[in-house]
Structure formats: C-alpha cells, structure tokens
C-alpha cells in the first residue's frame, strides 16, 4: 500500500522519486518512467480508503474522466496500472503548485492577473463541458500551475460524466462549501453552468482575497458547511467593488452574473465567459515594440502567467535551478559592467 512506497519503490515501469502530497483519499508521488526517463505525478489510493466503496468509485471515476480529456488547460492523463495490490495512475507533473498555494501567499491578485487566470480556467472548462463532463469541485486547490505558463484543471474525483451512469446517490450533496453552486447545495441536477458559479466564487476570491460567502462561526465543519450552503442558496452575494476599487465595472458585473442563483441567469457557457474576459483584458494590452524603433518589452511584460503568480519559483524541485539562473545573471551583469569600465579607461 502507499505507506510502503518510498523513494526507490517501483510500480511496474515507474520508480518513485519523491512525495508530492497526501490527502484524505489518496497520495501523490513524483515518479520516473523507467522506459523513457520522463517524470510524472503518480496518484494512488491510501490503504485506509481502498475498501471504501464510494471513495474507490471516485478514484476510478477520476481515471475514466481523465482518459477522455486532452487539452492544454487540463492536467494530462498518462497511464493507469495495478501492481503490488496498488491501483494507481500517472499524469502530467505540475511542480509549480496550485492556485491555492498562490492565494495563501498573496491573498489576492491584480485584476489583470485574475482575468488571465479566469481565461485559462474557462478554456479548460470549455473542453470539459464539450466532453459532457461537469467538474463539480472547481476550487483553487484543483487548479495547477504548469511549466508552460498555463493554469490547468485537475482532480476529477467528483466530476460528473453526463453520458455515464450516475455514481453519486440522488439527493446527496457533493462539492466544497465555499464554491458550491445553489443547485449542488440542494442536490439538484447539474450542468456546465454549475462550474461557472464556482468560477464566480474563484474570481471573487482572486480579486478580493476572500470568497463571496463566509461563516463567522468556525466551531465545527458541519456548522460551516450548513451555513455556507444556506448562503449560496438564499443570500445575495456582495459585489467585488464592495472590497476593491480598481476593478473594471464590466468585470464586477461579470462576476455578479456568474454568482446568479438560477443557472439560466448565468452566462451560457465557459466559452462565452472567456470571450468577455478577453475583451475586458484587451484594452490594457500594450502594443508590441516594432523592430528598429528601439526599446524592449519589460521583464514583467514577458513573464508567463505562472512566473508572475509564483514570483520566486516552483513549489518543488526547481528552487536550485532558479538560484543557479540568478547567480549566472549576476555574473553576466558583473562581467558587462567590468567590460564597460575597462573600455572607458
């Protein structure tokens, strides 16, 4: 079982090279494919949950959903296997952490960065919904920062395949309380607009540093869940402009529309939301520097979204590389300064 997996352990043609994290239902390791040398994230069920039928179904569901999806804004599935009595699957390694890590550090983002995040999330959701799948658990911890500079959706343990047999008992609420659409809270049928409500909660949090609804009494998880469910169903959400003053009015209006209680009052699709976000962002884009006109884009303008969000470097495995690059930059700059000084003598 997973507690026996340590650095050097092997599952078929994968060798464990490190641990990335552990949750209530599964553990995620860094692993190397011994056939081609590539590194992946390898996810297993924890030993305590392998006999839990519902959790086992969710793990299998996550694999079956991931197999259907192939998009640059979705964590890529690689391989599924069963070895040493361990059910596991491998996926694209995203070592820069999650949007949850970013918000824990920064609390909130500049509105332009939040819009870029929203665009990437919408592109992933668009593919998901076109594949007849509803994520149902869209939250910062399930949105990952990749090496190619994009945000990618992951963790499909609660995803609902609209074309397959229902795995969740009718009338049973699933999801994370802070991002729970009213129809989820009431255990009603869901569709892509359910994920758009969660996106509204995410956008609100990225822009203001807090979710739209909070529970003042933190004495128990059950109380928090009930309180937030009730607010998602009945309470009018605040406006982003109640907390930040520099947010474009169109963005404030879009987030408010995403948080509509009735699915019919929300935007019609993730593609529609992406188009609106792009049109909001476009006026802030600066024209490219034409050849021969002098000047270069600033470092900030050329940084990828991932680089701007993490600022210092990835959460695992790359800090040394960043340090080396900085050291090299210092050496190069020092050499240039020395050469200039010598030429002026």
Image: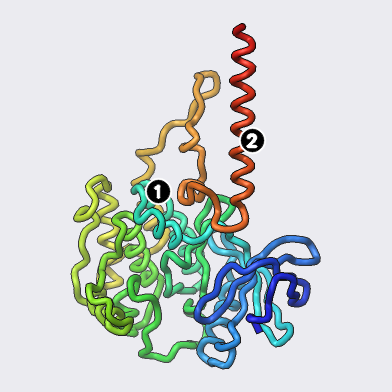
- Residue 161 seen in the figure: no
Q: Position of residue 284 (x, y in %)?
A: 36, 38
The quarter of the rendered structure image containing the C terminus is: top right
- Mark number for residue 113? 1
Q: Give me the residue at 29% from left, 59% from top.
A: 255
Q: Residues within 10 Å of mark 1 (few under 14, many from 20)?
A: some
State the image quarter where residue 186 is shown: bottom left
> How far apart are the alpha carbons under marks 1 and 2?
29 Å
Element marked by disc 2? helix
Q: Residues within 10 Å of mark 2 (few under 14, many from 20)?
A: few
Find the residue positioned furthest to the right.
35
Whether label 1 touches label 2, CB < 8 Å:
no
Residue at image mark 2:
328
Question: Between residues 90 and 345, which one lies in front from this camera angle?
Answer: 345
Q: Position of residue 64 (x, y in %)?
A: 59, 78
Which badge, 1 or 2, is on the more N-terminal residue? 1
Residue 200 in the figure: left or right of residue 313: left
- Mark number for residue 336? none
Question: Between residues 71 and 42, which one lies in front from this camera angle?
Answer: 42
Question: Between residues 32 and 321, which one lies in front from this camera angle?
Answer: 321
Say how the picture is coloured: rainbow
- Residue 175 seen in the figure: yes
> Where 217 falls versus 315 (above or below)?
below
Residue 197 in the figure: left or right of residue 44: left
> Where 40 falls versus 174 (above or below)?
above
Q: Position of residue 222 (x, y in %)?
A: 31, 84
Element marked by disc 1? helix
């Amino acid at each position: 079982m997973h507690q026996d997996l340590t650095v050097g352990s092997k599952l078929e043609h994968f060798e464990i090279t490190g641990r990335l994290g552990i949750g209530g239902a599964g553990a995620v390791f860094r692993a190397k494919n011994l056939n081609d040398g590539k590194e992946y994230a390898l996810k297993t069920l924890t030993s305590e949950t392998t006999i839990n039928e519902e959790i086992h179904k969710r793990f299998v569901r996550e694999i079956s959903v991931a197999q259907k999806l192939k998009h640059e804004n979705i964590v890529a599935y690689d391989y599924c296997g069963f070895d040493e009595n361990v059910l596991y699957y491998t996926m694209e390694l995203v070592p820069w952490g999650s949007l949850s890590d970013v918000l824990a550090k920064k609390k909130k983002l500049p509105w332009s960065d939040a819009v870029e995040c929203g665009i990437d999330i919408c592109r992933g959701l668009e593919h998901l919904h076109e594949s007849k799948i509803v994520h149902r658990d869209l939250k910062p911890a399930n949105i990952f920062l990749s090496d190619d500079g994009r945000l990618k959706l992951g963790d499909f343990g609660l995803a609902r395949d609209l074309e397959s047999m229902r795995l969740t008992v009718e009338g049973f609420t699933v999801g994370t309380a802070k991002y729970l659409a009213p129809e989820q809270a009431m255990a009603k049928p869901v569709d892509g607009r359910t994920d758009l409500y969660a996106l509204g909660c995410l956008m609100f949090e990225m822009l203001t540093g807090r979710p739209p609804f909070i529970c003042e009494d933190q004495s128990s998880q059950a109380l928090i869940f009930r309180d937030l469910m009730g607010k998602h169903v009945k309470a009018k959400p605040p406006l982003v402009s109640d907390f930040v003053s520099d947010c474009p009015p169109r963005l404030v209006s879009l987030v408010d529309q995403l948080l509509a209680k009735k699915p019919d009052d929300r935007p019609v699709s993730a593609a529609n939301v992406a188009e609106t976000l792009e049109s909001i962002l476009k006026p802030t884009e600066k024209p490219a520097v034409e050849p021969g006109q002098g000047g270069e884009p600033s470092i900030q303008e050329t940084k990828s979204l991932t680089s701007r969000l993490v600022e210092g470097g990835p959460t695992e495995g790359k800090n040394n590389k960043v340090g080396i690059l900085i050291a090299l930059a210092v050496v190069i700059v020092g050499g240039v300064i020395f050469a200039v000084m010598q030429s002026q003598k």
